[in-house]
Amino acid sequence: QVRLVESGGGLVQPGGSLTLSCVSSESIFGLQTMAWYRHAPGKQRELVADITRGGSTFYTDSVKGRFTIVKDNDKNTLFLQMDNLKPEDTAVYYCNGAGVNPGGWKYDYWGQGTQVTVSV
């Protein structure tokens, strides 16, 4: 069982920056997709950004140009660089690793989440 541990959340003013980290207990090289999701109070969980094993990335429209997802296979770590933060970015951010292994079994790993609060 892969264990994912997020860190880097906190309180930041609008326009500020944060870098979230997600460290995996095992190699992330083979994971098909790694992603950052967020869950704000009263809203549904939202996919923020993801990155495939091959390095292709996706960003939800509201964070394009402000957030950057990076995967460091050597350090077994996924990052989310968040710039020009807005109050609407306030949420608990979760790291995810998902896909299908060579044996055909689906896997879906989640971290415990880290709180990001954007406020004056």
Image (cartoon, rainbow, N blue to C red):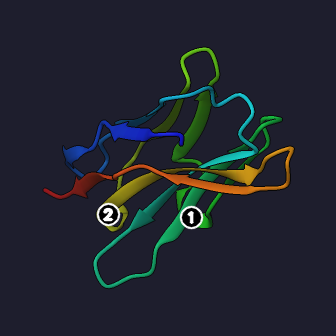
Q: Residue at x 45, y 40 (%)?
A: 4
Residue 20 position within the rendered picture, expressed as x and y whole percent measured from the top left: 39, 38
Q: Residue furthest left?
A: 120
Q: Residue at x 64, y 22 (%)?
A: 73
> Height in image: 118 above or below 32?
below
Q: Which residue is mark 2?
A: 91
Q: Earlier in the sequence, mark 1 or mark 2?
A: 1
Residue 63 position within the rendered picture, expressed as x and y whole percent measured from the top left: 53, 57
Judge from the rendering whether residue 43 lies leftward or rightward of residue 27; answer left or right. Answer: left
- For badge 2, the amino acid type reads Ala
Judge from the rendering whether residue 21 lies leftward or rightward of residue 71; answer left or right. Answer: left
Mark 1: few/some/many CA within 10 Å (<14, 14-19, 20+)? some
Mark 2: few/some/many CA within 10 Å (<14, 14-19, 20+)? many
80 or 63, which lies in front? 80
> Height in image: 1 above or below 29?
below
Local secondary structure at mark 1: strand
Q: Which residue is mark 1?
A: 47
Judge from the rendering whether residue 61 lies leftward or rightward of residue 101; answer left or right. Answer: left
Residue 115 position within the rendered picture, expressed as x and y whole percent measured from the top left: 26, 54
Q: Residue at x 78, y 37 (%)?
A: 53
Q: CA distance from mark 1 to mark 2?
A: 12 Å
Local secondary structure at mark 2: strand
> Height in image: 78 above or below 63?
above
Residue 83 position within the rendered picture, expressed as x and y whole percent measured from the top left: 42, 42
- For badge 1, the amino acid type reads Leu
